[in-house]
Image (tube, rainbow, N blue to C red):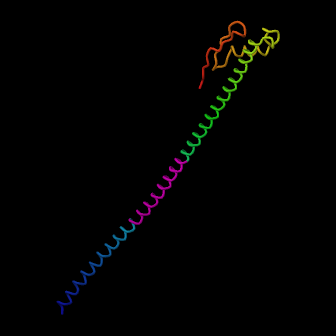
Amino acid sequence: MSQFAEQTKEQLAELEASHERMKILTASMDKIVKNHQEGHAQLSKASEETNKRLNLVVEEQHHSKRDRDFLAQDMTTLFSFYHSMKTQQQSQVMDNLYHQDAMLMNKTRYPSKYQGGDNMSYSEMGALKQLSEGSSWAKFSVTGEYDHMELIDYIDDS
């Protein structure tokens, strides 16, 4: 029985040593699991922060695009308004020129209907002066009397 007792003691010592190794392995495994969980938590936190930053960048780009679209729309509206005003102004100037030219031509053709034949009124002289000085888009040459006025050239600014 002493041999049996001795074997049992040896087995018990091995079992205790194995139990100690198991404790050490379990502690190491617990440490590994804990580190893995902490790493996963840090990764999740970093991922959330990255997503927040990415969302801010996307939102900023969206606002920037919207601002660019609004600016382009404003510029288009402004250009359209400028073009319509320029066209309207040119149209009014052309209407005035045609009216004044017709008035002067009628005066040349029918001098008896006007004050003393060849005499121009002050408003007609003003109109002629305005025509001779011209605007930026029409050039005139006035030589001698009002009946010798010639429309030389139209220059369009557009």
- Residue in the foreground of this view, choosing between 56 and 4: 56
Classify residue 126 by image quadrant: top right
Above or below: residue 78 compared with residue 49? above
Q: How many marks?
A: 0
Residue 103: x and y in percent read: 74, 17
Using the rendered view, name the quadrant where residue 76 is placed: top right
Q: Is residue 46 magenta?
A: yes
- 13 displayed left or right of 51: left
Q: Position of residue 96 (x, y in %)?
A: 71, 22
Tell me what residue is drawn at x 70 percent, y 6 percent. Answer: 144
Q: Does 20 sit left or right of 119 as displayed? A: left
- What residue is at 70 percent from the left and 21 percent from the top? 98
Question: Can residue 48 be seen?
Answer: yes
Q: Nearer the viewer, residue 25 or 75?
A: 75
The segment highlighted magenta reads: 36-62
Q: Is residue 125 visible?
A: no
Q: Does residue 126 sit above or below 84 in this rendering?
A: above
Nearer-the-camera pick, 23 or 81: 81
Residue 93 location, x and y as percent? 69, 23
Q: Nearer the viewer, residue 24 or 147?
A: 147
Q: What is the quadrant of residue 81 in the picture?
A: top right
Residue at image position (48%, 58%) is 48
- Magenta segment includes 132: no
Residue 106: percent from left, percent from top? 74, 15
Determine the residue located farthest toward the right in the rendered image.
115
Task: Name the residue rendered at 18%, 93% in the picture.
Answer: 1
Image vertical order of residue 134 relative to residue 74, above or below: above
Q: Is residue 52 left or right of residue 145?
A: left
